[in-house]
Image (spheres, coloured by chain):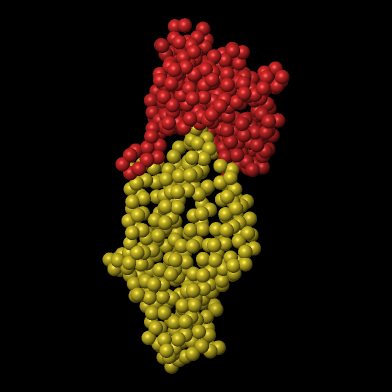
Amino acid sequence: MPRETCDPSTPALEASGVKKYYRGAAASLFRSGPVIKAVDGVDLVLPRGATVGLVGESGCGKSTLARVLIRLEEPTEGSIALGGEDFLALRGEALRRSRRRIQMIFQDPYSSLNPRLTVGSTIGEGIRIHRLARGAAVGERVAALLERVGLSAAASSKYPHEFSGGQRQRIGVARALAVEPEVIIADEPVSALDVSIRAQIVNLLGDLQSDFALTYLFIAHDLGIVEHVSDTVAVMYCGKIVELSPAEEIFREPLHPYTAGLIASAPAADPSGRGGRAAIPGDVPSPANVPPGCAFHPRCPRVMDVCRAVPPELVRRGAHRQVRCWLYPAGD
Amino acid sequence: MTGTGRVARRVLRMPAAAAGCAMLAAVVAGALLAGAVAPAPHDAIDLDAALRAPSFAHPFGTDPFGRDVFARVLHGARVSLGVGFLARTISLVLGLVLGAVAGYFGGRLDSIVMRLADITFAYPTLLLLIAIIAVVSPGIVSLFVTLGVVGWASVARLVRAQVLSVKEREFVQAARAAGAGHAALIVRHILPACLAPVLVVYTMGLGMTIMAEASLSFLGLGVQPPHPSWGGMVSSGIVFMRTAPWLTIFPGLALTVTVCALNLVGDGLRDALAPRLAAVDRSR
């Protein structure tokens, strides 16, 4: 694939073959611990201005993937291109300068704000670091950002504990916006919030996307929200993407049994329409001990012999869909 | 910071800690006002008044040279508190810097710093102090520098452990993602969140440092006569233990009161900070 930086068709973010392995705790003095494959070969493309939803149960590696994508952690393998530029090649000062291009909204609005700093200095930090403004102009920018996310400019001189969870998350959004990023990774931005507030934050993110031409990677375990915001949905299981489809298609006709299970187990807005809730049996396997073959086979209602032995590949299915499941053999 | 006043109030509401604060305040006031409070200068020799028992003229009696023991105890407080604070501050600075660097950067640097700490811990403190003082010459400066350097390891260990846990917190990660450099992350985000337990260890260690100073002075390796120090006074008074016990009792009592007060304050601080530490843990 040719890389052209200025071409608007260049994806805002492109990850290929990203792996993140950890070494688990040593079993004994002489035996090293198991390799934990938190992220095991993920290819993901975020087209400019789009929202890609990333779904999966806790422990499937979605947060690790997020941390790798913004380089809070280094991947074990793989490449990440930010606007066509090799993001992983950057070191030291160059990396710090480029960090403003990709920002993150964190899950927990309580632990993600420094309790000892005023809201103004938290939001202004990135502005100062990247010299987007100086002196009094920093305060003006902070005030404008606060108002843009629905808070008053006076919030700038207050401390995080003076705000509610929803307000704190707005502060987190303002901080991410402050450095004028191209890509924002929202790591479960509303799961810690009251249900009544979630829609407000989701709508705010939607408004900001059109105003600032942002590209989102929206991570969630709540399918309802993902359905609402995403153009494309990626479903992750045991560190791998098992299905990748346009949002409307994946909800109309999920291909992978795991996706179908997630959709069936989600509480529906109209319970009569979808029938009863069917939970996926069993638990997510430990990432240190992933089942052989297809990692989902012990929980899969449609398991076949081949699933237990051979891991399936991600195959194309139609023009826009990809699925990793033996129900859909390659070339079918 | 708004929390400081709240912590101070919580400490003073605890009876034991409040008593500790009062004792400490008395010792500090005595040390500061030594010249004004004492009935005679600490170095005025009056051989006619040697070895007098406590009286109105000499509340703590006099020593073999007729010097006023009360004045000497007050001046000894200056030495003890001064050496203690200076030594602890040296330990604090060394421990903060090395502990933060070890915890933040990890890897080989961490291993080197922590093995140095292990080596420091491996020696009995007093023995290590005696060995170092034996090499450098005894005196007040070598005393607090040695005490300070020997005390770095416990602070460094604590700071490192704190930094390890704080650096993974989301607000630190957020600042890193915003492009903050190492120095900004450590100084602005990580260290302020580590200071509460460090303050407790600083205060508790103060008592131990004063004790160590007194031990060294007792052994003749610390403050040199004729300069008054509690350890030195106990040491020189011990031959008169049966005829003039006030020579050893009063400096010994001053030492006990001071160390006890510091430990009480340290305990109080720990308890006062605990709910806040717990709250931080919960919000993690």
Say which of A168 and A322 sits in front.
A322
Q: Which chain is red?
A: A
The answer to whether residue B232 is left or right of residue A203 is left
Residue shown at the point (57%, 50%) measured from the top left: B278
The colour assigned to chain B within the rendered structure: yellow
Q: In the figure, is residue B128 to the left or right of B91?
A: left
Give x and y (percent) for residue A146: 65, 32
Whether B181 is drawn above or below A89: the answer is below
Q: Is residue A260 above or below residue B265?
A: above
Q: Where on the picture, by quarter, is residue A301?
A: top right
**In this orientation, which residue lies closer to the viewer: A318 or A69?**
A318
The number of discs equals 0
Q: Residue at x 70, y 17 (%)?
A: A273
In the image as oriented, which residue stretches furthest toward the bottom?
B48
Please determine whether, in this image, residue B127 is positioned above or below residue B226: above
Please tell me whether residue A142 is drawn above or below residue A305 in the rendered image.
below
Residue A69: x and y in percent read 47, 26
Given residues A36 and A20, the one toward you in this image is A36
